[in-house]
Each structure stands twice: as C-alpha cells, then as structure tokens.
Image (spheres, rainbow, N blue to C red):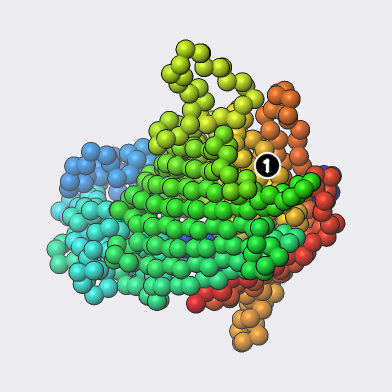
Amino acid sequence: MLKVKKTLLIFSLMLTINNLSFSEGKILKNELPKNEREFFEGGSLIDLQSEIKESETNIDTSELPKFFVKTITLKTPTITIKPLVNPKKIDKILAEYKNKEINILDLRALVKKLNEEYANEGYITTRVYLEPDQNLQSGEIRLVALEGKIEEIILDKDTAKDKRRVFFAFTNEKDKILNISHIDNGIDNLNRVESNNSKINIIPGTKQGYSKVIVESEKEKPIRLVLNYEDTQKDKQKYKTTLEYDNLLGINDNIYFSYRGDVRKLTKAHKDDYTESYLAGYSFPVKSWTLGFSFNKSREKSLILGSRTNYTLLTKSNQYGINTTKLLYRDADTKVNLTMGLDVKREKTYVASQRLETQDRNITVASIGVNGLFKPFKGIMSYNLSYSKGIKGFRSKEDNPFNAGTMPTPSIEAADNRFEFGKVNLNLSYYKPFYFKNQGVIFRTMFNAQYTNDSLFSIEKYSIGDFSTVKGFPSTVSGDIGYSTKVELSYILSNNEGKIGKFLYRVRPYIEADLGKVRNNYNEKGEKRGKIATMSSYSIGIRYYGEKITLDTGISKIDSGRGLMKTDSHRGFATVSVTF
C-alpha cells in the first residue's frame, strides 16, 4: 500500500513538471474513444472572426483626431427572449470606453472585443458594426449587432438520404441565429459512427445576413468485423467477435452483434467449465437526443466436485436495456448530457439440470445521471455520475412480496440482499499528452467507484481484479461498495517522418499502477460493515495503435491482495484487436 502511495505521488510530481514545459501532441486512432478524440482535437473547426490584420505597431496615434465619448449604445435588429451575450459582459466592455477621449483605433478595438465576446458564446457569424450617418464628435456612439442566421444545411450531395441524415443529426436551425455549438452537436451525431468523418464549411448565403453550412464527409465502408483475443487472467483466455454496421437506416444509426467466449470451451476437457455471452445493440440520434437499445445473454457453467459424483452448475442470465441521452450544454471546451435508462435483468440457476427457483434473480433497474467531457489543463476529462434504483415492474421481485394467505409476510432483514436497492456510480478518466523537444509522455488516469447503503446481489456489486480495474489477478472479488483507480505514464518513441518513424510513433511503452478496494455492507453474520478487500499491482507494458491492429502486452506484479486468492507474484498479459 505504501508503495502505491509513493508511486501516485511520483506521478503527480511528474505531471506538475510536465505542465510547466510541455505541449499537446497528436492522438492516435484507438488511443481514445472516437467521441473523446474528436472533441479534444476539434476545439475550433472554423474561425470566421479572423480579419485582415493591419500593422499598427508603427502608427503614431498622437496625430489621430480624438473625440470624447459620453454614451455607447449597442442595438440588435431582432428582439430575442434571452440575450445572445450576458448584458453584464457587454456593459463591462462598453464601460472601458465611456467618459473618455478615444480615437478611431480605440473604436476599432471596441468593436473587435464585442465581436470576440459574441464568438466566445458560439455566435461566430454575428458581427458588430458602427451605425452609418452619425457624428462621432457628438459624444454618442451607436453600434449595431447584425445577427448571422442559417439559410440551410447541406450534407454532401444533398440526396434524399443526405437530407434524412441532416434531419436526425441537426436541430431545426433554418432561419435561426447561427451558433457553432449547435452545429458542432450535429457534426457529433454524424461522426458518432466509426465509418464517417464530417467537417463543415460556412459560406455566405443568398440572403443578406444569412450563411449556408456545407458539410463534407469522408466515408469508409459501413460494415466492420472486429476480432479480439484476451489473455489477461490465468487459465481464462477469451476471444470476442463483433460485427457492426453503420447507417443501416440512413439516420446516423449503428447496430452491432457480438459473441464472447472462453478459448478453453473449444477443447473437450473444459466443456463443463466456461463462460460465454451474446450481445446486441442498436442506437441512433434524434437531434439533441440519442436513443439506444441493448440485449445481453450470458451462460456460466462450472463443475462441482462431489464425494460420489460431479455436478454441473449453470447460470443463465438475460438483460434487456433501453437508454436515452439528452444534450444539455455544449461549447468548444465543455459538453454536458443527461442520461436515463431502464434495464430488465433475469438470472436463473441450475444444478444438474434442475432449476433452483429460489435462486432466481428478477430485477428491474432505473437509472438517471449526467455525463460529459471538458478540457482541464489542456487535457481531456470524461465523467459519468449516475444513480440506479431497483424498481417494481416487468415481473421484478420485491423486497416485501404480498402474502395472499393468513400468515403475515416476514419482515426483511437489514443484511438481506435487496431487489429494490439504490446505488451511486462515478466514473472519471483524464488524458493529457506532453511533448518536449519532439519527445514526450502521455499521462492517463481513471477512477471508478460505487456506493450504496444496501446489500446487493452479485450482478449489482462492484468488482475488482480484472484487466480494466486491477491487473494481474486470476479472478475478481466484489462488494457492495468499492472503487478502483489507475495511473499510467506512456512514452512517445518518435514522431519523425519515414516508415520507421511513423511506426515507432504508434508504439507506446508504459508503466501503470492499479489500486482497488471493495467491501460488503454486512458480513456473513449479518453484522454491519464487512471486511475490506484490497488489491494493488504494478504493470509495465507496450501498446501498438495501428489502423487495423491494436496490441497491448506486458507483465504485472502483485503488490497487495495475494491473501484473497491463490495467485502468482507475476503475471503476463496480452490483448489483440483486429478490424476488417
């Protein structure tokens, strides 16, 4: 534990030093999820506020005529319910030029500041001008903000399919004031599928004060086959096959089917000891909303050794889910979403082909939360905070079931597992690249946690000890409450031109420290607060981010947690992903 704390401290110091002397670098494909990578790199798709800059360094302003300013008014030709820019910000800028003598260059600087303020709020085609036919010597300055509006949004060749994709991707922006944040959200919806990469160009429209938004797309084949191999836990090598299709209905939608199984199931010796799962999902955006459906079916089979004969234990589970996301706020540096979901979970257990109905787990879970992205310290952070509640409905079991007989229903014990539970989950991740003299490192950290006051069934508990939480352990441990964190530093080998340089730039040697803790709210005796289980490990490895192949291999050393299970002090790992 002390070693982990020291490592975290060292990493923090290294991050502080890098903050002082390094700058950002290029993010590779698969190094971050596509939406995070594009949000991080897409800080300014266009800049319509850039003007021809005249050299003013050698201008002698002492000879320029000056005029005393008493009042400055800024008018807008249309009346909006909510001002485009906070009036306090406008008044603060105007106050800098009131009740003083200024010249024409000062007036130009005032107009520039106002334009920048509108641009900061996303209104990049709204421009401030000096009203014609006015006497500056009168002491009254009249300015007008001409609000730039959208004439139309055109995608690619503007076919019927293109128009349908625009309808589902963009909010109704025609004849509305152009705000780049609304346009960016539409681009996010177009680019949510892996095979599409759209960018925008804004050109003058046919009407005065209007602009056309031209969207051009680079497209790859819409269908993908992804093969994965995982050797991350002892004797638990797994493989996964995923088939994806983009824009099946031409509404920026995505559908996928996936199978994940144990490699050892392929051998006759392990036909009665394996896990496998089938997954399917479909999602599509509707303007500022995204709707998704999912299905997960899994089987876990194990062999129980008896004194006279052996028995098979089989657990079958099905999960049906529907979720929706609503964009609440977006600008160049911040994105906030509201999330809602409903999951119906069914689990049945069989021993020697006989169903144990008392072990059935019928749970319905409703969830609500917020997630999003922002860019602190020139990096990118993603977050997800959600609250989940076990509810009645969809044939879910209840904590106090109705008793139709004459006997009263027994009261539930505090330590009993709850169908109608409540829990909070938090997920954080942060990524920042640094460079110094064409060399650099990448700092990455993650933190995941769960909290509840209830006693949970196994499918709702928080688990640690796998590849995504704490590396190096042969199996996981779980608890009602828990957290896990990762801190990683990876080294950028080269960014030089040439085949060797480009290849080395895709290689990322790294070191990593993992830590996780879980505990149950009640122990086996029903007493409050169960025993805390702690796992920690160090890892050193190397990743390769190719266009079609992603590789991660290395070795982990167990720091704490060996007493929880039989495990080796060191364990190698490897994951491979190939896309066709």
Q: Residue at x 40, y 47 (%)?
A: 322
Q: Is residue 469 visible?
A: no
Q: Is residue 403 left or right of residue 527?
A: left
Q: Position of residue 478 (x, y in %)?
A: 68, 42
Q: Residue at x 40, y 65 (%)?
A: 193
Q: Residue at x 64, y 35 (%)?
A: 480
Does dot 1 land on a helix, a strand or a loop? strand
Query: Number of marks in the image?
Result: 1
- Observer-nearest of 196 and 72: 196
Residue that protrudes farthest toward the bottom in the picture = 498
Q: Is residue 89 left or right of residue 473?
A: left
Quadrant that contains the N terminus: top right
Graded by Cα atoms within 10 Å as few (under 14), some (14 to 19) or many (20 or more), the crowding at tag 1 reads some
Q: Is residue 574 visible?
A: yes
Q: What amino acid is at disc 1?
A: Ser
Q: Residue at x 71, y 44 (%)?
A: 477
Does residue 447 lie above or below 174 as drawn?
Answer: above
Q: Position of residue 148 (x, y in %)?
A: 23, 56
Residue under label 1, please give it: 478
Q: Quadrant of residue 431?
A: bottom right
Q: Is residue 310 left or right of residue 60?
A: right
Does residue 62 lie above or below 424 as drawn?
Answer: below
Q: Is residue 28 left or right of residue 440?
A: left
- Observer-nearest of 517 and 381: 517
